Image (spheres, rainbow, N blue to C red):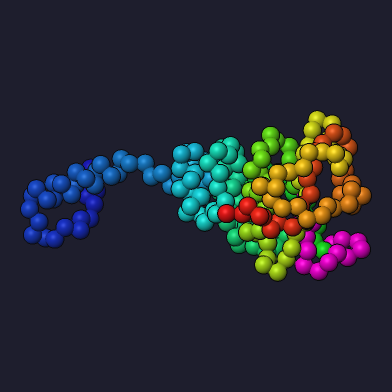
């Protein structure tokens, strides 16, 4: 015989109230709790990802992004917020878009770079859309310290590997973001470990003219 559960009803409850309490309690026991899977970015239903992103304070969200990117974005959001202002946060910011990061802080460079600057290299191995430039810049901007400045280099990966594109490559649209100068090819080339055919863009400042 199953043990009766404690009730919160007062002692003078009617038989109907007691029966309803017992019946609803039995129905609730049959409900399988959705936690913790519902709050797990890797297990939650894809339809719930926007709500989980809002719960975790994700500020940059693309409804047209792939399911893989959405899960990465939500899964890394807390790490980025907890470690904001550190190289680790910048690494996670690049990874959240599905890119491979290569972060070099000014004190890791030889010769030493300008204090409080970072070189952020994002190696792209997936399909690329025009809005990804601004999205990466916004995520880096949210992850970095207010004091720090970053040079962002976007390198496209192909089956042949990675390489530097020439100055004849089509420039980015001014409506997407502002380019101020370019990182010397020798500097970027020294940081790449593979060769092949690729296309890259260099951003020396992420002050967007079209930033909403």
Relative depth, front residue between 153 and 126: 153
Q: Nearer the viewer, residue 95 or 23?
A: 95
Task: Examine the rendering and report whether any part of residue 47 can be seen.
Answer: yes
- Number of numbered discs present? 0
Observer-nearest of 183 and 117: 183
Looking at the rendered image, the quarter that the C terminus falls into is bottom right
Relative horizontal placement of residue 74, taking residue 127 as reference (left or right): left
Quadrant of the rendered structure where residue 29 is? top left
Residue 11 versus residue 93: which sits nearer the camera?
Answer: 93
- Residue lying farthest top? 159
Q: Say left or right for 51 vs 196.
A: left
Let me know if residue 108 is in the magenta part: yes
Query: Is residue 99 shown in magenta?
Result: no
Q: Residue at x 48, y 45 (%)?
A: 50
Where does the image place residue 120, in percent across and percent down from the top left? 76, 54
Viewport quadrant of the N terminus = top left
Q: Which residues are magenta?
A: 107-121
Relative image position of residue 159 (x, y in whole percent): 80, 30
- In the picture, measured across the screen, residue 124 lies left or right of residue 37, that is right
Residue ID at (86%, 45%): 192
Residue at image position (67%, 55%) is 208
Residue 176: x %, y % from top left: 66, 47
The answer, for residue 91, to whether it is visible in the render is no
Who's the residue at 87% across and 49% down the image? 188
């Amino acid at each position: 015989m199953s043990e009766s559960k404690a009730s919160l009803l007062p002692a003078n409850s009617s038989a109907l109230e007691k029966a309803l309490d017992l019946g609803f309690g039995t129905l609730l026991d049959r409900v399988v709790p959705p936690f913790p899977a519902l709050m797990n970015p890797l297990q939650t239903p894809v339809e719930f990802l926007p709500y989980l992103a809002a719960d975790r304070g994700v500020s940059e969200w693309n409804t047209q992004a792939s399911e893989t990117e959405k899960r990465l974005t939500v899964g890394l959001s807390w790490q980025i917020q907890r470690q904001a202002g550190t190289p680790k946060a910048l690494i996670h910011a690049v990874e959240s878009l599905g890119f491979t990061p290569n972060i070099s802080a000014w004190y890791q460079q030889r010769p030493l770079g300008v204090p409080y600057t970072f070189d952020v290299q994002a190696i792209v191995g997936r399909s690329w859309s025009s809005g990804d430039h601004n999205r990466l810049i916004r995520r880096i901007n949210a992850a970095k310290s207010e004091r720090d400045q970053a040079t962002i280099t976007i390198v496209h990966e192909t089956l042949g590997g990675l390489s530097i594109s020439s100055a004849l490559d089509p420039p980015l649209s001014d409506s997407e973001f502002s380019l101020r100068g370019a990182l010397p090819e020798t500097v970027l080339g020294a940081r790449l470990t593979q060769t092949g055919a690729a296309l890259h863009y260099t951003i020396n400042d992420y002050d967007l003219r079209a930033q909403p």
